[in-house]
Image: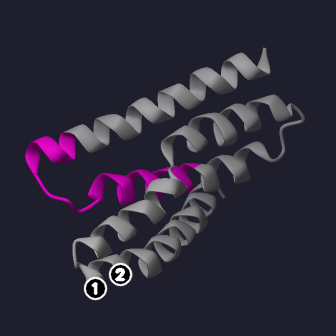
Amino acid sequence: MTLLLVSIAGAAGCVVRYVFEYLVRRNHPTSRPWATVFANALGTGIAGFAAYRLIALSDGQVRTIVLTGFCGGLTTFSSALAVPVILQREHHWGYAAALITTTPLLCSGMFVLGMSLAH
C-alpha cells in the first residue's frame, strides 16, 4: 500500500512541476529554468516543513509519502544539473555558474525556512 501511495504522491509532484514549467514557458518564453528553480525551492521548503512536523509521527508511512513521494516528484536534481550544462553549451557561462552556486543555497535556505515555519 505504501508503494502505491508514494507513487500517487510522486506523480502529483511531477504534475505540479510540469504545470510550473508550462505556465512559465507559456507566459515567458525563455531558456532560463525559472520553473525548475522554483519547483526545487518549493519542494525543499515543503520537505523542511514536513520533516519537522512529521518527525514526531510514529507512522513513518506518512513521512515517506510526503517526502519521498510528493517532494521527490516535485524536485528535480537531474534538471538542476543538466540545465546549467545546456546553458554553458549555449555560451551562457555566467548564468550557468550562477545556477550551480545559487540553487543549493536557495534550496538549503528554503528547507530551513520550512522547518522554521513548522516550529
For label 2, count other residues whose C-alpha is less than 10 Å away and answer few (under 14), some (14-19) or many (20+).
few
The residues bearing labels 2 and 1 have C-alpha atoms spaced at a distance of 6 Å
From the viewer's perspective, tell me whether residue 40 is left or right of residue 18: right
**What x and y, as percent, mark residue 54?**
75, 43
| Quadrant for the N terminus in the image | top right
Between 29 and 19, which is closer to the camera in this rendering? 29
The magenta region covers 23-46
Task: Give the residue number, with chain letter if any, for mark 2.
Answer: 98
Q: Is 14 drawn above or below residue 72 in the view shown?
A: above
Q: Indicate yes or no whether the magenta region holds residue 30.
A: yes
Between 92 and 70, which is closer to the camera in this rendering? 92
Give the residue at x 34% y 36%.
18
Task: Give the residue number, with chain letter if any, for mark 1.
Answer: 94
Residue 117 lies in quadrant: bottom right
**What x and y, as percent, mark residue 35?**
31, 52
Residue 87 lies in quadrant: bottom left
